[in-house]
Image (cartoon, rainbow, N blue to C red):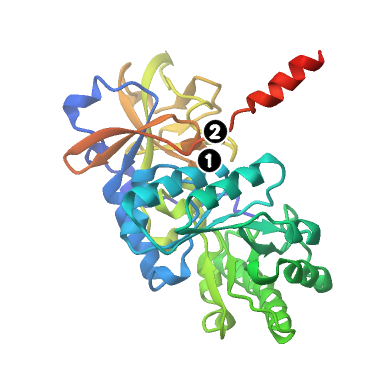
Amino acid sequence: MPDAEPRPLPASWYEDPTSLLPPRELLDSLPTPLLAIHMGRVRANIARVLALTNGPERWRPHLKTTKTPEVWAELLAAGLRAFKCATVREAEVFCDLVEREGRDGIDLLLAHPLLGPGLGRLAALATRHPSVTISILVEDARAAATLPAPLTAFVDVDPGMHRTGLSPEHPAEILRVAEALGARLRGIHFYEGHLHDSDPDVRRAAVHAALDRLVELRDRFVASGLEIGELVTSGTPAFLSALSHRDLRGLDSTLHRVSPGTVVFHDVISEHENPELGLAPAALVLARVVSRPAPDRATLDTGTKSVSSDAGDPCCFVLGHEGFEPLHPSEEHLPLRVPPSSAPERGALLALVPRHVCPTVNLHDRALLVDGTQTRETSVAARGHGEKVPRSVLQVHRARR
């Protein structure tokens, strides 16, 4: 479990954040709350992770955090060609970007065991974009045998998170699913997202123990004649540990990839859990002080509808302000406990680093891209799910009433 007292944040988080914000002449006219993305930091974070993975081959970045085509274009420009996403909406927006940029050889894994209309929607997308290889997760032999063309699949194995996937305690069942996929088997998905102990040595030992079982599974299946082209593991908390696993570095005929996504934007949780990553927060929520209800209180015009509180309190960190303590938010208000001697005035604009950036980004329709001297607005195009209830379904429902 994480420490009761988290590690101190870097000194840079307490420095004046003015250089990260839009030009001063724009600040007074900006609506708040507002998501602001610092593109220089996005590029620096991508470069840092590529240094840690020793190039793009072993990184399959998860797109669920960033959700904006402009940021995804930076990943493509950095040489990345294999990606992971969580929703059909993200897949659609990403494939449209790939087509606009004229990229070939792109590989996208939708890391979810899709059922129902979403599966047909993804298959139609794969048909429209033949230059992108699209895969999903499967955990059932019947679903594997009836997987619609041209989709491919990874067998989903549960390392102990108990969210999706088959238990490695039942290798025969996993083998049946793999064999049912036939030539459309891509490999094994093994997400150990529950292993994020705050002690890096304890975490590394737990991750390595889990990955030992994955390597055993892979070796067993290869010995039985199956081709296991790829092993996909590890989000942000565990990916450094996975990269250090000796047996995953040079598997014959099988590529191991990690799949962190938060690393592109970074957040408070990741900084506490992985200070050694050397990343900087690139996605900020700008908010204004709208009330000073007490000498040691300031209230911002942001709440759970613009900064996610799913990871608990404090839901964010106030950049450049030591001693500003975010309290529990309501839907549209975030109270701060502040030192009376340095309390902000009404109207002051503050920059917040989300505790959990992934769902925070999903709360915003629009974002401001800050790129050197250039500032522009963009759509958070892949937020939500973006699927309408088919009109034919509603017509049948009305006809039956």
State how many labels appear. 2
Mark 2 burial class by Cα count in 10 Å: few <14, some 14-19, many 20+? few
Asked whether 256 or 30 is in front, the reply is 256
Residue under label 2: 386
Name the quadrant containing residue 121: top right
> Can you give x and y, in whole percent of width and height, for residue 43 in the image?
30, 54
Does 223 sit above or below residue 321?
below
Real-space Cα separation, disc 2 to disc 1, in angstroms: 6 Å
Q: Is residue 33 left or right of residue 306?
A: left
Name the quadrant containing residue 158: bottom right
**Visible in this render: residue 7?**
no
Q: Earlier in the sequence, mark 2 or mark 1?
A: 1
Asked whether 272 or 105 is in front, the reply is 105
Asked whether 324 or 285 is in front, the reply is 285
Q: Residue at x 25, y 19 (%)?
A: 29
Q: Is residue 386 left or right of residue 190?
A: left
Q: Please say if the residues under marks 2 and 1 sit with CB atoms less than 8 Å apart.
A: yes
Asked whether 100 or 250 is in front, the reply is 100
Residue under label 1: 89
